[in-house]
Image (tube, rainbow, N blue to C red):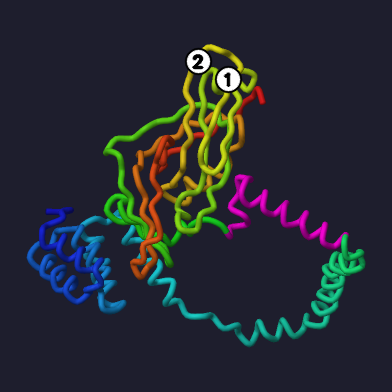
Amino acid sequence: MKNKYTDRLQSAIKALKAGNKSKARKLILAEVKENPSNLTAWTWALEVAANEKEKRTILKRILSLDPNHQGALGYLRKLDQSQRPTVEPSSNSLSKKAVHSEKSSKTNSRLGALLLLPFQWFFSLPLFCGFIFIIAILATGGYYYYQVNTSFFGLAGADFDNLIISNSYEKIEAEDLYWEVQFEGQGKTKYIGTVRHISPIRINEFKILTHDILVTTADYSDPDLVETSVVNHKYTWKSTNPEPPNGSINLIHAIPTNKAIYQQLLTIENWDIVNIIGREIYTVKSYQVDETFLGTWIDTGCNTLLIDSVTVLKNPDR
């Protein structure tokens, strides 16, 4: 009975979602006592744990049942990191800082003066030119943030190092949000072709969704035969030939399974040839940690994909 939703566990989950944590706790504790090998029950036990000590006991139990359980390993790392003491500098290091303080102060003064130069130049501009400059900066920043395949200096997207994943990615938790994922089936889908569009997805409620990737083959890969466009997470195409194009065109909404996959997606450029494999997703429901419902991402006409494999080949013809 390694991974099973019993009637009692389902009742506990309903009670938890209804806000009755006390009832849910009693039911879950009864379940793990009667069925100590029910991995699913132990993962839900984390939701009703009374304190950190109890959480660690539950995590150890989960890892005894599944030593490679990524959610439990990530949760345990998070607890360990929160307990790390702050290391105070030694008196020796303080004395070294004192020796070099005068030199550092002079260096910092020069650096500060250099950093102030752009601001001095800006405030010397006429008012109208200043407004134009600000608008140009905002426009450039907006384009870079929403259109360029980048993590925006690590400030955008989910913190994949600290995600808690349970039930084979059916529930994904971050510090401030969590998501319930409904898959279309058990199998995996492979997409091979030429990338004609890649851009980041910047939706805070669904920050585990990281990229829109338009993968094409045959005629759809040829810009002389087919024009393509991706706007607001939807794609369109237009053929210059009256005959229907040969090949395929698919817009993938990407959810990486881990940080390594996310880093690979950040390397993709237009006209690269990719091989992407993952599990098809039907819906993603977003909640705040207090269980406030934020919305549903529904896969309509495109392919939301939990990606666990990416191969990128640079197109020599581009």
Q: Is residue 100 above or below residue 278?
A: below
Q: Are marks 1 and 2 in contact (CB under 8 Å)?
A: yes
Q: Amino acid at mark 1?
A: Ser
Q: Is residue 2 left or right of residue 110?
A: left
Q: Is residue 272 left or right of residue 122?
A: left
Q: Secondary structure at mark 1?
A: strand
Of 305 and 231, which appears nearest the observer? Answer: 231
Alpha-carbon neighbours of circle 1 within 10 Å: few (<14), some, or many (≥20)? some
Report the residue at 84% width, 70% height from top.
Answer: 116
Q: Which corner quadrant holds the C terminus?
A: top right
Q: Amino acid at mark 2?
A: Pro
Q: Secondary structure at mark 2?
A: loop
Return the x and y of residue 192 as percentages of the image width and height.
Answer: 47, 27
Return the x and y of residue 162 as percentages of the image width and height.
Answer: 43, 62
Q: Which residues are magenta?
A: 129-155
Instruction: Determine which residue is flagged by label 2.
Output: 244
Could one spot residue 308 in this view of the protein?
no
Could one spot residue 42 in this view of the protein?
yes
Q: Which corner quadrant holds the N terminus?
A: bottom left
> On residue 239, which mark appears?
1
Report the residue at 82% width, 58% height from top.
Answer: 133
Q: Quadrant of residue 180?
A: bottom left
Q: Quadrant of residue 33?
A: bottom left
Of 293 and 317, which appears nearest the observer? Answer: 293
Magenta segment, principal secondary structure? helix
Q: Quadrant of residue 238?
A: top right
Return the x and y of residue 111 as percentages of the image width and height.
Answer: 83, 70
Q: Is residue 228 above or below residue 26?
A: above
